[in-house]
């Protein structure tokens, strides 16, 4: 059962990583490719230990238990590519290439030793779940177990060291969590390999420890799951964050519609985008939501600039006074006052009144807050409070009109 679980975990991780690399060209870095290769080799290594595959390999090669050495060799190759991934993250592609040479030599040497020891071991019936434990009293199998455990332990310690080092360099919390999960997985894998090394050392003396296959399989399964989670969680979390970001962009576009629609009616030569941006719009233009939000923000700013000659400081002051009566905070007061000023300017322009030569200053908003401010402005712009304030403004205004002055800063 455990080989199915571990191979399934690696395959699922490979599918997730592969889909990300296929959809995002910027993710096709040496580290990303090494991550995919690690998952693929890990999956094949685990599939080789599944009973039907195990027997099929024995029948094809003509030697029992050949699949076990293939699985262990592929497992070391997979771990080597995991090291490449970490090296690319910590040292860059050029530094990883230089650091990978001696690691490749160690991995290749370990695989060669395993192959030689396996060839020297007398052939026994297929035992896919416990070939090493069932034959641990044989000297070659005991040495095989020690060699494999030491090689894999060295790789896991290297991965743990690189993971801790890289966690100090990253800034995104999802990547840091992924590295922590990866480190936990290497710890479980290291515990399993140390147990296998002890089995081999005891086997060299001609003895064996009490059976502990369930514990060994549990350590393997837990370690593989945590390793795969460490690889997948940052990608999935990043995708979720991107999904939420694009949803928010579409939501802001939708909330801007009341103001955008009225400005587009007055200035069709300035505001040229689609007026309606509902559910269908943001689904169809999923990857364009950021561009659409930026375009809509710029166009609304341009429309408000065209409208400035009709903006009146009196409208701003009356709007602020009405908002203060409602007990709003300073930001809400400025928002209501600006909304009254914009609504009044649109109404005045539609009435055919000439614009003022002195333009009124708009409320200053930080660049990273412009879209949110305009969305709130568009929503406030159509509220009952603004309509009531416009009525109060009409009763206070001199029929002859007043020349606009600048808003106090």
Image (cartoon, rainbow, N blue to C red):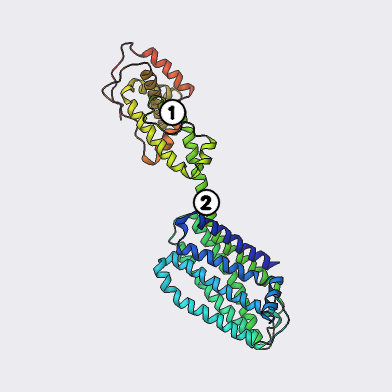
> 304 and 229: which one is in front?
304
For residue 259, which numbered disc appears in the image?
Answer: 1
Residue lying farthest to the front in this orientation: 60
Please state the horizontal and vertical placement of residue 6, each as a whole percent of the image. 64, 66
Residue lying farthest to the top in this orientation: 399
> 278 and 204: which one is in front?
278
Counting other residues with Cα less than 10 Å from the Cα at mark 1, is it few (<14), some (14-19), or many (20 or more)?
A: many
Hey, which quadrant is residue 309 in on the image? top left
Does residue 310 lie above or below 152 as drawn?
above
Does residue 255 lie above or below 209 as drawn?
above
Residue visible at 67% across and 68% down in the picture: 3
Residue 156 seen = no
Residue lying farthest to the right in this orientation: 125
Q: Mark 2 points at which residue?
A: 239
> 129 and 317: which one is in front?
129
Please state the horizontal and vertical placement of residue 105, each as a whole percent of the image. 48, 79
Would you say 55 lies left or right of 283 here?
right
Q: Distance between the residues labelled 2 and 1?
A: 32 Å
Residue visible at 41% across and 73% down in the picture: 98
Please state the horizontal and vertical placement of residue 130, each as a whole percent of the image. 70, 77
């Amino acid at each position: 059962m455990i080989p199915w679980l571990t191979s399934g975990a690696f395959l699922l991780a490979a599918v997730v990583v592969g889909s990300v690399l296929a959809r995002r060209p910027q993710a096709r870095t040496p580290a990303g490719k090494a991550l995919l290769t690690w998952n693929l080799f890990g999956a094949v290594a685990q599939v080789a230990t599944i009973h039907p595959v195990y027997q099929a390999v024995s029948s094809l090669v003509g030697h029992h238990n050949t699949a076990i050495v293939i699985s262990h060799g592929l497992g070391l190759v997979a771990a080597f590519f995991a090291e490449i991934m970490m090296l690319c993250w910590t040292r860059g592609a050029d530094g990883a290439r230089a650091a990978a040479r001696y690691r490749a030599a160690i991995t290749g040497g370990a695989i060669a030793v395993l192959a030689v020891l396996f060839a020297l071991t007398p052939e026994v019936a297929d035992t896919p779940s416990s070939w090493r434990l069932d034959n641990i009293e044989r000297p070659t199998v005991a040495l095989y177990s020690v060699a494999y455990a030491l090689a894999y332990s060295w790789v896991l310690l290297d991965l743990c060291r690189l993971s801790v080092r890289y966690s100090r360099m990253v800034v995104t919390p999802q990547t840091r969590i992924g590295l922590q999960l990866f480190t936990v997985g290497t710890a479980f894998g290291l515990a399993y390999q140390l147990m296998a090394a002890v089995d081999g050392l005891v086997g060299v003396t001609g003895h064996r420890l009490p059976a502990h296959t369930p514990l060994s399989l549990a350590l393997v399964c837990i370690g593989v799951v945590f390793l795969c989670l460490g690889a997948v969680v940052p990608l999935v979390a990043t995708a979720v964050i991107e999904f939420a970001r694009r949803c928010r962009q579409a939501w802001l576009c939708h909330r801007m519609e009341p103001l955008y629609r009225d400005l587009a009616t007055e200035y069709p030569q300035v505001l040229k985008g689609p007026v309606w941006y509902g559910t269908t719009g943001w689904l169809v233009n999923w990857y364009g939501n950021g561009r659409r939000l930026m375009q809509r923000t710029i166009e609304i700013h341009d429309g408000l600039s065209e409208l400035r000659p009709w903006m009146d400081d009196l409208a701003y002051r009356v709007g602020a006074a009405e908002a203060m009566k409602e007990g709003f905070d300073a930001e809400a007061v400025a928002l209501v006052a600006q909304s009254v000023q914009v609504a009044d300017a649109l109404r005045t322009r539609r009435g055919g009144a000439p614009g003022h030569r002195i333009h009124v200053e708009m409320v200053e908003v930080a660049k990273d807050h412009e879209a949110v401010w305009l969305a709130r402005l568009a929503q406030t712009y159509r509220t009952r409070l603004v309509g009531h304030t416009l009525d109060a403004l009409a009763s206070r205004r001199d029929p002859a009109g007043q020349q606009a002055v600048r808003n106090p800063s």
